[in-house]
């Protein structure tokens, strides 16, 4: 039995003298980890298709433990994500976040489509937008969608003076003091979160939020996601170090 599946490479590590162990998020089988024999050799047919961020068609022989990846065909190489340091940092964060929050062989085609869309947007240079859209939509796909319209505590509709809690969404001014760690958010960020969550992904490119709103949302999403992560992400430390120096426009 073999599996022929469309997938995107999340993570790669070397094994032995010439092999790679490749973690691929696939369209119909979820996350798979497989050995690609000889993939590090210059003339090997798997060399390009097993690089991180590559979107391709993969032929996988299922085995107990580590599967075997024997053939591949590239759909999108995503080479620009590997050639530019800032793009590489953001793409690494996106793929590591997905890797950290998903289990092996737990398929979700909507998650695959989200990953493909986010990496395509990052390749175009809309790095912060790609990361924030991916974060909030991934939370929804994994069952952690934030409540953005009604107070989590009293269920009254929120309109202004809005607070956010890492536990799952917004709080009204009256209830916020009862929830430790809740933070006030601006109406601009509240509206931006709704758009990132609800608009069609292809339409998000019309959004050009101010730097202040981007930074506020980054901090909010960081707390929201950290609440659900079991361990810190290596890529996030790298990304924050890289972006400590003010980058150019994204």
Image: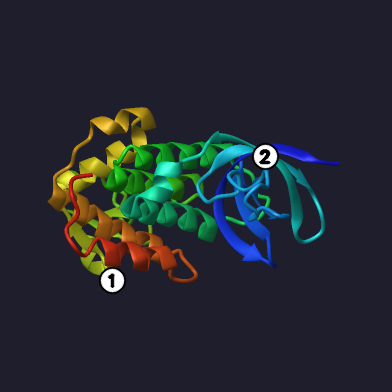
Q: Quadrant of residue 244?
A: bottom left
Question: Quadrant of the image for the N terminus?
Answer: top right
Q: Position of residue 77 (x, y in %)?
A: 51, 39
Q: Is residue 68 left or right of residue 140?
A: right
Q: Is residue 203 above or below residue 36?
A: above
- What residue sits 60% from the left and 43% below the top? 49
Give residue 40's quadrant in the image. bottom right
Question: What residue lies at 31% left-to-right and 28% top-to-bottom?
Answer: 203
- The residue lying furthest to the front in this view is 43
Quadrant (top left, top right, bottom left, bottom right) of the C terminus: top left
Question: What residue is pinned by disc 2?
Answer: 72
Residue under label 1: 180
Expressed as whole percent of the image width and height from the top left, the position of residue 228 reads: 45, 63
Question: Is residue 145 visible in the rendered structure shown here?
Answer: no
Q: CA distance from mark 2 to mark 1?
A: 50 Å
Q: Nearer the viewer, residue 88 or 145?
A: 88
């Amino acid at each position: 039995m073999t599996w022929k599946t469309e997938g995107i490479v999340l993570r790669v590590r070397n094994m032995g003298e010439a092999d790679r162990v490749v973690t691929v998020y696939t369209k119909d089988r979820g996350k798979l980890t497989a050995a690609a024999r000889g993939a590090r050799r210059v003339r090997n047919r798997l060399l390009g298709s097993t690089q991180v961020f590559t979107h391709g068609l993969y032929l996988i022989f299922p085995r107990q433990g580590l599967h075997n990846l024997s053939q591949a065909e590239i759909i999108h190489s995503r080479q620009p994500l590997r050639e530019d340091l800032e793009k590489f940092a953001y793409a690494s964060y996106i793929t590591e976040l997905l890797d950290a929050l998903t289990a092996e062989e737990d398929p979700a085609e909507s998650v695959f489509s989200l990953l493909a869309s986010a990496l395509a947007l990052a390749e175009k240079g809309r790095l912060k937008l790609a990361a924030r859209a991916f974060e909030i939509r991934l939370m929804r796909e994994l069952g952690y969608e934030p409540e953005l319209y009604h107070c989590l505590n009293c269920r009254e509709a929120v309109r202004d003076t809005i607070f956010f809690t890492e536990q799952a969404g917004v709080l009204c001014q009256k209830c916020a003091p009862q929830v430790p760690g809740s933070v006030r958010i601006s109406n601009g960020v509240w509206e931006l979160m709704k758009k990132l969550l609800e608009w069609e992904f292809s339409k998000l490119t019309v959004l050009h939020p101010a730097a202040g709103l981007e930074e506020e949302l980054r901090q909010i999403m960081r707390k929201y996601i950290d609440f659900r992560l079991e361990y810190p992400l290596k890529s996030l430390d790298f990304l924050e170090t890289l972006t400590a120096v003010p980058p150019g426009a994204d």
